[in-house]
Amino acid sequence: MLYQILALLIWSSSLIVGKLTYSMMDPVLVVQVRLIIAMIIVMPLFLRRWKKIDKPMRKQLWWLAFFNYTAVFLLQFIGLKYTSASSAVTMIGLEPLLVVFVGHFFFKDKAKWFHWLFGAMAFIGVAILINGGKIMKALITSVYSAVY
């Protein structure tokens, strides 16, 4: 449990630290340093398992690794230049909802009812954060008026 909490703290502070480092270095350099540290940690595991992977699949794995980590982190840190860390975290919080939408509408993936429920809750939460709680007051007032 301690390692999970530590990982959560490190992961959740990455965009805040990224925003603070803009005054010291370029976002591309920040991502490179971050990925080099991760490479040093992961490399021993990678080398042991790399030989077991079929050669035709290796090229696909390289592309997947590039787009899934390097490109995503790079775009997130470049995006920090144009917004606050809290806005960036809020937008990133919508990623699971976007995955459900894209899967449903473009790939005909059948999402379960709880995916839609929690996706709607995430969307409402982000809307409340963006509007500074103004929507929450309106919702409470509407519910109270309807019940009364």
Image (spheres, grey):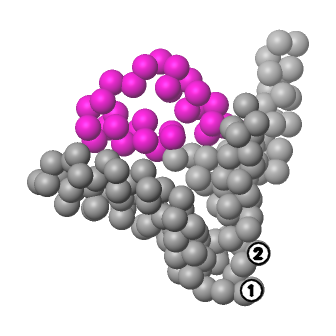
Is residue 72 covered in magenta? no
Relative height, residue 130 to residue 88 (above, below)? above
For badge 1, the amino acid type reads Ser
Residue 37's disc is none
Q: Is residue 68 left or right of residue 133?
A: left
Task: Based on the picture, tell me whether residue 106 belongs to the magenta stretch.
Answer: yes
Provide the residue designation for mark 1: 23
What is the C-alpha distance between the residues marked 2 and 1?
7 Å
Instruction: Give 130 or 22, whichever is nearer the viewer.
Output: 22
- Decide whether the magenta segment is chiefly helix, strand or loop: helix
Residue at image location 74% in from the left, 86% down from the top: 23
Q: Residues within 10 Å of mark 2 (few under 14, many from 20)?
A: few
Residue 42 in view, yes or no: yes
Query: In the picture shown, does residue 87 fall above or below 3?
Result: below
| Boundaries of the magenta span | 96-125
Label 2 sits on a secondary structure element that is helix
- The secondary structure type at the circle numbered 1 is loop
